[in-house]
Amino acid sequence: MKNPGRLLCGILVLVFLAPLALASEPQMGGTFRYAMNSDPEHLDPMITTSWKVVTPARHIFETLLEFDSEWEPVPMLAESYESLDDGMTLVFHLRTGVKFHNGKTMTSQDVAASITRWGKYGNGGATLWNAVDRLETPDDLTFIIRLKERLGGVILSLLANMMGGPVIMPEEIAAAATKEPVPPESIIGTGPYRLVEWIPNRHVKLVRFEEYVPVDMPPDGYAGAKIAYFDTILIQPVPAENTRFAGITVGEFQLVENVSVDVYDQVAADPNLQALLLGPPVFPGLMLDTSEGITANAKIRQAILVALGMEPILQATYGNPEFWELSGSIYPPNTIWYVDEAHDHPLYNQADPERARQLAAEGGYQGEELIFVFPSVVPEIYKFSLVVAEQLGQAGFKIKSEMYDWPTYASVRTQPELFDVASSTFSFKSDPAMIPLFDAGYVPKWDTEEKRDIIDRMTAAATLEERYAAWKQLQMLVYEQVPFISMGFGYPMFVGNAKVEGLGTEKHPFTMPLSFWNTWFAEDK
């Protein structure tokens, strides 16, 4: 089995350690400009996993817990917590004096209203909400969750998750919010930066929140002290990859996303630039609508999987094999959730158009159009989608490809009547319970009795061994029912100005969603 991960490790060391050797003392000031490939659809991170939304929102909002550099949940807005009654009661003791951006002091009532809104309407909130008996706020600094069903350790991961997770808002905003995005004027959190302006198609403007008091812990991953060194962060939509790259080379931006790895050597040779590879890796994948239309039939979904050859797809997407890894497991090797049997599954990486035709025929496929939607502004998604469309066409599927800007694509993929297959990339999640693809309300609309039974056992498991056994069954069920398809792993490349320090360190990993606290401009020599 090809394993470029070891080679990739060497690249990551070179990319990350070179800036560290020249690290300067942190200093305050300046405007940091980050070019994304699209505007965010909105700025409410509770109801989406889109990094377009969560990247700016991560600086505005915080959660009770946060993930450290080892992906362990640790206190953030909570000062401490305790598990009682054999895990059926969780008591959170909140930090004192935490201020919202509107000047209000955070209390347990704000936390309860936020958790309630997320549980009812948030992305993945049902996993927690269905197990909750009641929430209690005995005083302003104590928040209690009483469960009616066991959730084991997964509850802590859920409460630390920013990607569609339970960020804390003022009570009056959270209590009035529904499944619709909170409007910009109500985007008020406790984070190190506050929103001052969002002009669609121009920028999201964040400024340092002067009343922010960092937690008294060393920076560690997303956790610990968050120091807002930049005066201002401007997040700007720049759809064209060439325009983003040209902008970073002339100093218009300080960081640009999703640049082709084809220019890695050029970036590495330029002393004014630094290459930053996302890690842990993302997995590029397809989401198949299981609720209606052609792809409601599992045989046809299996046919789509069998038609695909993953190596050409990953090669076209990431180029140099050192930037991608072939694997049928949703989690990469050297993680506790890796499933070796998934890598060798007989339906993975088959590139077998004849067998695909047979399975499609068994599913009743008669040449209907297969509507395939994907965004045009994310280079890696666009590249692999073209190869997927070609391979499916070779297997006899009549493909109708529809490309959109990101906001339109994000809207279309929530409407099953508008598509059969949608492509995207998915960032690393420290716990399987956080993977949105397993949420019955998410794009594949996957909601079978077998899946529900496994997830119930996985979330209720008392030990890691029991949880892994259930997770392994769920991973293998994906190959049987094929609600989505994982191609393998990729390491998208971002390019930053060499003066930007603090990104990609051991204690500040360069991972999605990005964070720009504890990051600063080096002083001119």
Image (cartoon, rainbow, N blue to C red):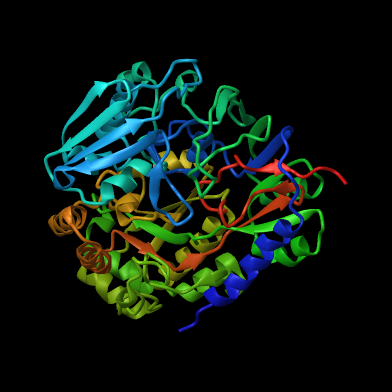
When the figure is inspected, residue 428 is found, relative to residue 475, above or below; the finding is above
Q: Is 236 positioned to the left or the right of 85 in the image? A: right
Viewer-proximal residue among 458 and 198? 458
Query: What x and y, as percent, mark residue 420?
Result: 34, 53
Location of residue 398 (image quadrant) = bottom left
Viewer-proximal residue among 212 and 129? 212
Q: Is 73 positioned to the left or the right of 267 in the image? A: left
Outermost residue, bottom side: 1
Q: Is 172 positioned to the left or the right of 323 in the image? A: left
Outermost residue, front side: 216
Query: What x and y, as percent, mark residue 99?
Result: 47, 21
Residue displayed at 26% across by 51% down: 153
Location of residue 10 (image quadrant) = bottom right
Viewer-proximal residue among 205 and 78? 78
Residue displayed at 59% across by 76% down: 7
Q: Is residue 131 visible?
A: yes
Q: Is residue 243 visible?
A: no
Viewer-proximal residue among 119 and 211? 211
Location of residue 1 (image quadrant) = bottom left
Query: What x and y, as percent, mark residue 440?
Result: 24, 47
Residue displayed at 59% across by 55% down: 379
Query: What x and y, as percent, mark residue 319?
Result: 61, 70
